[in-house]
Image: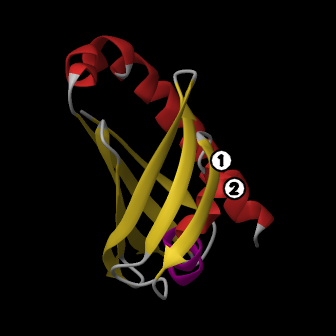
Amino acid sequence: MHVERTFTVSRSIEDVFDYLSDFENTNEWDPGTIDTRRTGGDGGLGTTYANTSRFAGREVELTYETIGHDRPTFFSARGTNAQSTATDSMTFTRDGDRTQIRYRADFEFRGLVKYLAPFVVKPKLSALADETVEQIRASLERSA
C-alpha cells in the first residue's frame, strides 16, 4: 500500500534535498513524527535514525536507514519494526528556481496488522499525505 504526491516549492533543488534528506528534520515536516534522532552515519547511505511516530492513535517506534542518497535528485529511507516497513522516497527535479518534489511512502505490514491495514490504515493515508505536503511546504518556507 502506498501514497504519492507531486508538488512544487519555491526553493533551490540543493536546499530542498539537503533539508529533506536530513531525516532528523521529520521532526518539523512529518505530521506523525514525535521524535527522530540520528543514531549512526554521516547523513549519506547507511545513516540510521530512531523514529517515534503516532499514527491512528498509536505510538510506534521505527529504525530508519538511508537507502538512497543521490544529491540533489533522490533520497530514500526505510523504517522497520516487528509489525511494518515504511519506505519514504523523494525525487527532486529542478523547475527554474523552484523544485518539484515527488514524494512516495510505501507501507508493508506483517502479522495480524497485514490483514487489518486495508480497512484501518488505508483510509487515513490520503489525508496524512496531504498534511505531509503542507507541512513540508511550511517547513521549507520557515527555513528559507
The magenta-colored residue range is 13-22
Residue 75 is situated, as x and y percent measured from the top left of the image, at: 37, 71
Q: Is residue 57 left or right of residue 121?
A: right
Residue at image coords 68%, 63% = 140
Q: Which residue corresponds to mark 1?
A: 135
Q: Toward which corner of the image does residue 3 lie, by quadrant?
A: top left
Q: Position of residue 112 (x, y in %)?
A: 23, 19
Name, please, the residue furthest toward the front: 82
Numbered tag placed on residue 28 in the rendering = 2
Q: Quick check: marks 2 and 1 in contact, CB under 8 Å?
A: yes
Check disc 1: other Cα within 10 Å, few if <14, some if 14-19, many if 20+: some
Q: Residue at x 51, y 26 (%)?
A: 127
Task: Indicate yes or no whether the magenta region holds residue 66.
Answer: no
Using the image as rendered, state which of residue 30 and residue 7 is in the foreground. Answer: 30
- Tell me the kind of residue under disc 2: Glu
User: Element type at marker 1?
Assistant: helix
The residue at the far bottom in this view is: 42
Counting from the top left corner in percent of width and height, residue 5 is at 40, 44
Q: Eyeballing the image, is 109 above or below 38? A: above
Farthest-out residue, top: 119
Decide if residue 5 is in sight here.
yes
Residue displayed at 31% across by 11% down: 119
Question: Which quadrant: the N terminus?
Answer: top left
Q: Residues within 10 Å of mark 2 (few under 14, many from 20)?
A: some
Instruction: Specify whether residue 106 is in view.
Output: no
What is the number of the mark on residue 7? none
Look at the picture and state if 135 lies above or below 70: above
Quadrant (top left, top right, bottom left, bottom right) of the C terminus: bottom right
